[in-house]
Amino acid sequence: MGIRKKIMKFRIWLSAKLWYGGNPDETMAKRFKLFVGVAVLLIGVSKLLYLTGVTLPNVELIIPTLVVVGAFSLYTGGGKNWEKVRKYFGLIALLSVLLIDLVFWGFKTIYLFTWPAFVLCWFLGMRKDLSFFDKFSDLAVKATLTGAVAILAFDMITAFGTWLLWRPLTLGALYGVYAAQVPFTFYHLASLIFIPPLVGFGKIVSRVKMKVPVAVKAKVKERERR
């Protein structure tokens, strides 16, 4: 068997395992499982790239991914394990990132503010009930606005933590911390560019062909026969 045939055979096997199921429900469940798996991978890779200095400061995939996966209703089939993964995706993904932080940096007191802030971002996404079957432009706008609110909330909480832990506990110092945070927040908002592609990937995943019965009037059939 040639290399090309082996590659083709592998592609067919991989698509059958990850992309297609025995019926539309199974196909939909497989694809959304793939979407969730890719989301977890993106969060982990984003954190590793940030730690190695590859990505720009404050530009990250964690909050955009948390918001997008949290905002959409995902059907992962009847399996209880996958239902738990979908339900607690934010906590599972954040736990993996927390472990990476602990390995590279050890425990930092600022984590008392950053990690609750990440969880808040996840909950902000979950407050939305979006569907990948809706129009892409509407979904992208709604998800991006939710992401913007999540980023602003995250930066406000972490800036407050910085003031509480390391700055004089005065209103002037608090004002100074928030003023210094503004340029970093603008950089952070640049992370919103990742939301439309994530929504687009979700739209691709949700495109499953389904047979729908169509009622046809008898008169129309008679006309067609004539």
Image (tube, helix red, strand yellow):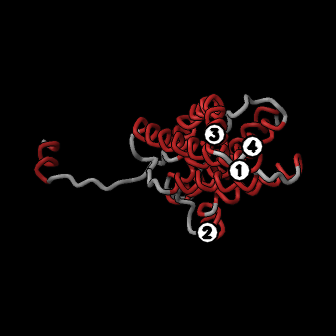
Q: Amino acid at mark 2?
A: Gly
Q: Is residue 109 visible?
A: yes
Q: How far apart in space, not on screen, are marks 1 and 4 (Cα)?
A: 55 Å
Q: Is residue 1 left or right of residue 152?
A: right
Q: Which residue is mark 2?
A: 79
**Image location (x, y in percent) of residue 14:** 70, 47
Q: How far apart in space, not on screen, are marks 3 and 1 (Cα)?
A: 13 Å
Which-is-in-front pick, marks 2 and 3?
Answer: 3
Disc 1 crowd, CA 10 A, few/some/many (<14, 14-19, 20+): some
Q: Quadrant of the C terminus?
A: top left
Q: Of marks 4 and 3, which one's residue comes earlier in the chain? A: 4
Disc 2 crowd, CA 10 A, few/some/many (<14, 14-19, 20+): few
Q: How far apart in space, not on screen, are marks 4 and 2 (Cα)?
A: 26 Å
- Would you say the residues marked 3 and 1 are in contact, meaning their CB atoms lie under 8 Å apart? no
Q: Of marks 3 and 1, which one's residue comes earlier in the chain? A: 1
Snapshot quadrant of residue 48: top right
Q: Is residue 183 left or right of residue 211?
A: right
Q: Which residue is mark 3?
A: 172
Q: Of marks 4 and 2, which one's residue comes earlier in the chain? A: 4
Q: Which residue is mark 1?
A: 164
Q: Residue 10, which numbered label?
A: 4
